[in-house]
Image: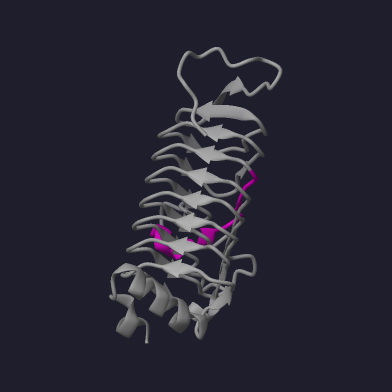
Amino acid sequence: MLTLFGWVPTNLGIGLRAIVYRAILKMRGFAAIEKGVRIRFANLVRLDHGVYLDERVYLHACPNGIDIGKNTLVMYGSVLHVYNFRNMPHSGISIGQDSLIGEYNVIRGQGGVRIGDRVYTSPMVQILAVNHVFDDPSRPFIEQGITAEGITVEDDVWIGSGAILTDGVTVGKGAVIGAGSVVTRDVPSYTVVAGIPARVIKTIDPSKPRKSHIPVYF
């Protein structure tokens, strides 16, 4: 059924898919799904009202599912991949409301990824809640297992293009991750971090007025 209606373009296709996918996915309201979206284990995907899945998005929800909150957008070519066949109890991906997952993001949820409300990720961001063990040089790393602690991104975070969040980190509320950064440790709330590995370069202080001459648009 997904193949039959998945290719239909324009608003007609979005309308048809809204009807057909409702019978398969766990939709709470109306969600807009563009053509070319691929979904594995669709019965484990939950979409709130106003969710938008752009073309070429891929969702792989096994086993604990993917939950996307109200009015959240997942943009072109992004991959949300749980892929847990090792019986890890905390796997899964959840995204809050009014968030945006930018183009060509990769989110791996083996250890569990929890993204809050009003979180924006720029293009090419990677959020990877899994690591390989490679401590024993006498054995191939593929025989040494994995670790999967999980990643939490709290509300109102902005993640710049090409940034990578590694397993086990928490990004605090209101933080900003600089483009191209590799986050290997927790990020305090209301700070700006950048670099490899990412380090705090600024604290966001509301008591200090903005001095830039660049216009701001709303």
| Residue 5, quarter of the rendered image | bottom left
Quadrant of image for the N terminus: bottom left
**Count of numbered marks:** 0
| Residue 210, quarter of the rendered image | top right
Tell me: residue 101, above or below residue 171: below
Tell me: residue 41, above or below residue 151: below
Q: Residue furthest right?
A: 207
Q: Residue at x 61, y 55 (%)?
A: 97
Q: Is residue 31 visible?
A: yes
Q: Is residue 41 visible?
A: no
Tell me: residue 78, above or below residue 34: above
Q: Nearer the viewer, residue 158 or 177?
A: 158
Q: Residue at x 67, y 21 (%)?
A: 205
Q: Nearer the viewer, residue 115 or 197?
A: 115
Identify the colour scheme used.
Answer: one colour
Q: Residue at x 42, y 33 (%)?
A: 179
Name the spot of residue 170 as percent of width and height, x first: 63, 44
Name the spot of residue 57 as percent of width and height, x first: 38, 63
Q: Nearer the viewer, residue 159 or 170?
A: 159
Q: Is residue 152 magenta?
A: yes
Name the spot of residue 63 as percent of width and height, x first: 55, 75
Name the spot of residue 64 as percent of width and height, x first: 59, 72
Q: Residue at x 60, y 61 (%)?
A: 69
Q: Is residue 146 magenta?
A: yes
Magenta stretch: give its range. 139-155
